[in-house]
Amino acid sequence: MTFIKYQHVQHFGADETEGLTDGVCYIFPKMDGSNMCAYTEDGEIRCMSRNCILDGDHPFTRYVKGHPEIGRILKENPGIRLYGEWMTPHAVRSYTADTWEHWFVFEVCSENKHLEHMTQTGEILTCEGEYYIPYDIYSRLLDDYGVDYIPPLAVIDRPSGNDIQKMADEDNVWHITEGQGCGEGVVVKRYGYRNRYGETYWAKVINTQFRTMRLKQRHRRLSDGDTTLEEVIAENVMTLDLVNKEYAKIAETDGKVNQGKLLGIVWKCVIDEFIWDILKKYRNPVIDFGRLRDSCLDLVKEMRPELFGGVPLDGSE
């Protein structure tokens, strides 16, 4: 098997996940770690991050080598890939001490659609012909080998956006130190789901407090003067009127606003309409356009939060 990058989990409400909640959904904690994968190639164990193959000196590779149960499940079930969260400190620091330097599987995929496994109790498990093996099956497979994984917070038939946001804001305390709030958010899955393009995508909903914390950190930097030129420029050119104008244009043309399209069009507006004024105002500065883009798009997300990990501000579906 070769390198296969894990899917990009979409924000809840994105066009790619239309209809996702029209059935029984599994709501999982979204852990704030690094996406890592283990699989086999030519009979050898391989480890990868989201974007590249890892060498033998990487801490995650050493972790896999130090946990033989991971190698056994991969070699005894050829064709499967284990995707998991490698827990090292990022933004969320409130996890319990036993969470760090640990790997928790959140997805088991099978390129062999006819995969079968007999458990130690004699039960036959199959992948049901799906690339994304359902949780009720892969959890028993992982249990059989003693591989750790992330359990769902709830299994709900046709959950509403408000139901999911509540779980992200109030119920997501798995591996969180008691009294330290909730985790980053939740991920919504419906096994067997295909969107209108025939693709499978999951959705994420971010904890409101987590989103607010990041915005407050940025505002604090701005008020303290601890900012980059790119952040200052973004604050000056980005307005709610600009974002709402482009939002309305997309809604009128497409009937529904795709978050990626809105981000792209707003960024194009910044370059097309404001770059000359920026150069004059700041006297031909050296600009990091990657950083400027990130700063501008962060403001779009602040102005239209319902498209980026939350539900509409008015609470509608």
Image (cartoon, rainbow, N blue to C red):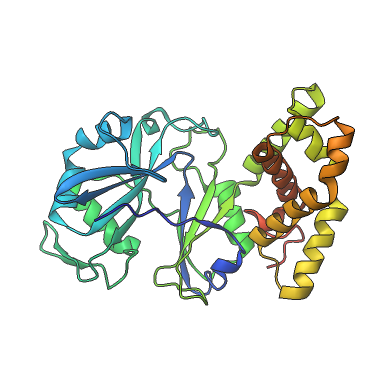
**Residue sitting at x 32%, y 42%:** 53
Q: Give the image location of residue 23, x and y in percent.
A: 48, 74
In this view, the residue farthest toward the front is 284
In the visual, does 261 lie left or right of 21?
A: right
Residue 46 visible to the viewer:
yes
Residue 239 visible to the viewer:
no
Count of numbered badges drawn on the protein? 0
**Residue sitting at x 40%, y 54%:** 6
In the visual, does 316 lie left or right of 168?
A: right
Considering the image in quadrants, where does the N terminus appear? bottom left
Which of 267/151 is in front? 267
Considering the image in quadrants, where does the C terminus appear? bottom right
Vertical placement of 153 versus 94: above or below? below
**Residue sitting at x 41%, y 46%:** 50
Q: Give the image location of residue 292, x and y in percent.
A: 71, 39
Which of 265/157 is in front? 265
In the visual, does 62 lie left or right of 221?
A: left
User: Image quarter for residue 123?
Assistant: bottom left
User: Image quarter for residue 108?
Assistant: bottom left
In the visual, does 289 lie left or right of 200?
A: right
Q: Give the image location of residue 124, x and y in percent.
A: 15, 67
**Residue sitting at x 34%, y 35%:** 102
